[in-house]
Amino acid sequence: MDQVVHQQCDATPAGPGSVFHNRPAQKILGYLSNKWNVLVIRRLSKRTMRYAELKRDIGDISEKMLTQTLRQLESIGLVERKIYPVIPPKVEYSLTDLGRTLEKPLAILCDWSVTHIAEVEDALKRYEEKKKAEQ
């Protein structure tokens, strides 16, 4: 099974105009490969939240970027927006069943990030020093 999944992820296009035809993983990763998407999904994996709560919890995300992120995640079926007919309007965001399937993979990625941050920062520092020395 693993080999089949890897083959599907690495498949080459069938011909002109079929950039994503045989690369389903590339297409989906394109939707997800954004730090804001990951942060929003991680926050919503804990509980349903309102817009202002998400903004406050994430911190350095602009209103425009949060709105775009929520719309994109909703459009690909990962986030559900529920509007309550009250004044002022109340809107809540939660993960869909499909969105919940990302909880474990993202937790693994986030755990990896925490475990290896020092190594990554050291590598970045060495790279920058090497670049300076080459100039």
Image: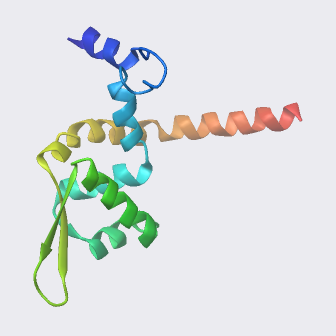
Quarter of the image for the N terminus: give it: top left
With 24 as the anchor, is 98 left or right in this view? left
Q: Residue at x 11, y 46 (%)?
A: 97
Quarter of the image for the C terminus: give it: top right
Q: How is the image coloured?
A: rainbow
**x, y percent for residue 92:** 18, 70
On screen, 78 above or below 47?
above
**Image quadrant where residue 63 sits:** bottom left
On screen, 20 above or below 37?
above
Q: Residue at x 40, y 27 (%)?
A: 20
**x, y percent for residue 128:** 73, 39
With 97 as the anchor, is 67 left or right in this view? right
Using the image as rendered, state which of residue 63 and residue 83 is in the foreground: 83
Q: Is residue 42 visible?
A: no
**Image quadrant where residue 93 sits:** bottom left
Q: Is residue 135 visible?
A: yes
Return the residue found at the far right.
135
Q: Residue at x 44, y 69 (%)?
A: 64
**x, y percent for residue 31:** 37, 42
Return the residue found at the far bottom.
87
**x, y percent for residue 116:** 46, 36
Q: How many marks?
A: 0
Using the image as rendered, state which of residue 43 and residue 127 is in the foreground: 43
